[in-house]
Image (tube, rainbow, N blue to C red):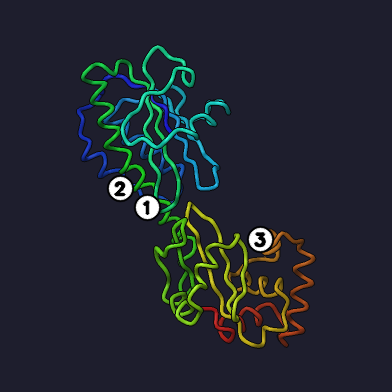
Amino acid sequence: MALLQLTPSKKPLQPGQQIARIYERIQMQDEMAFKQAVIRQLDHVVAIECLYWLVWDSEQRFDCMTYSNSDSYTACSLTAEQIATLNKLPLAKRPTSLSQDIFPAKEQVCYISSQCCKTGRIHTLIVSVLNETTEHGKRTMDLLALFLPHLLQASTLQQLNTARANYSQPGSAYAICDSSGIFIEASQAFETILDQMKENWLENICNSAPGFIETDNILCRTQQAHGFICLEAMRLPDSFSVLTSKEKQVCFFLSKAFTNKAIAEQLGSSEKTIENQLTSIYKKSGVRSRAMLIHTIKDHYQII
């Protein structure tokens, strides 16, 4: 959600060029830096004095960015009551007036919002124009209605690129699905696993809580990231059947070159517990060192 107090445009309006430049920013890995870049592009078309950008996800969690010409980027200053009220507003693709009970102001306050079908995230702009009855005020409303779908699409693409960068390692078996569990993309290794699984396997995985699920010698990790459902899979050989679930999860992270400390953080355990589990894995698998275990996992236990 963004709150904008607007003055007459300080630069010639070139919305098409600014929209194109927004899409040029989707390769940025840092979401905050991406949002700042988008705001700068918007500021080229509509002079911004103050902006709040709130985004709600499918779990009703939200993040907020505040921008002003005087303070640059600061913490969100909306009250909890305002946020709760705004969260209940219906979606509006055209600027819609807000009650002054929500935002007391001399000027008319409007909002515009839309929901991304891929991630379930809701983006809302709350706008205060100096005089919406003027030709400039009406032009501002038209521009915001034009920009929001592109802002939404560019934000989704940036989040998808970030998720892809985190999971698409060479040879990895990964997939990225939208918030409803529909495939967006998958590695060849993951598609190979999928072809061998039962018909409803993917649906059951996507509908499960984040964490590890083991089915038919396949260990799959699910995570919510950047509004998407991200999956990583590891094929388990029959010899791994003697390992406990936690020991198999330790092997999963070993394949990703995690340290004991990092594995402990991922599994909510202590480093001592991980050390004990590794000792048990060594005994059960017949290997003598960490390096040999990692080599065995990758080369012989067919992580794909």
Q: Are marks 3 and 1 in contact (CB under 8 Å)?
A: no
Residue corresponding to mark 2: 23
Instruction: Please rate how many residues cluster around mark 3, counting C-alpha atoms within 10 Å: few if below 14, some from 14 to 19, many from 20.
Output: few
Q: Residue at coordinates 74% horizontally, 81% vertically from top-left?
A: 282
Residue 266, disc = 3
How many other residues sit within 10 Å of disc 1, few (<14), some (14-19) or many (≥20)? some
Direction from residue 13 to residue 185 in the image, left or right: right
Question: In the rendered image of this protein, does residue 177 appear above or below residue 139?
Answer: below
Name the one closer to the observer, 89 or 242. Answer: 89
Asked if residue 42 is positioned above or below residue 5 in the image, the reply reads below
Mark 2 vs mark 1, CA separation in Å: 9 Å
Tell me: 263 left or right of 12: right
Could you say where residue 245 lies in the image, as x and y percent from the top left?
Answer: 70, 73
Residue type highlighted by circle 1: Leu
- Say if mark 2 contacts mark 1, CB within 8 Å: yes
**Residue 189 sits in which quadrant?**
bottom left
Q: Is residue 157 left or right of residue 17?
A: right
Q: Nearer the viewer, mark 2 or mark 1?
A: 1
- Can residue 75 be seen? no
Q: Position of residue 102 (x, y in %)?
A: 48, 21
Dot 2 alpha-carbon crowd within 10 angstroms: few under 14, some 14 to 19, many 20 or more: some
Rendered image quadrant of residue 70 = top left
N-terminal label among 2 and 3: 2
User: Mark 2 is on which residue type?
Assistant: Tyr
- Residue 27 is marked as none
Camera-side residue of 210 and 300? 210
Give the residue furthest to the top: 106
Q: CA distance from mark 2 to mark 3?
A: 34 Å
Q: Secondary structure at mark 1?
A: helix
Q: Which mark is residue 157?
A: 1
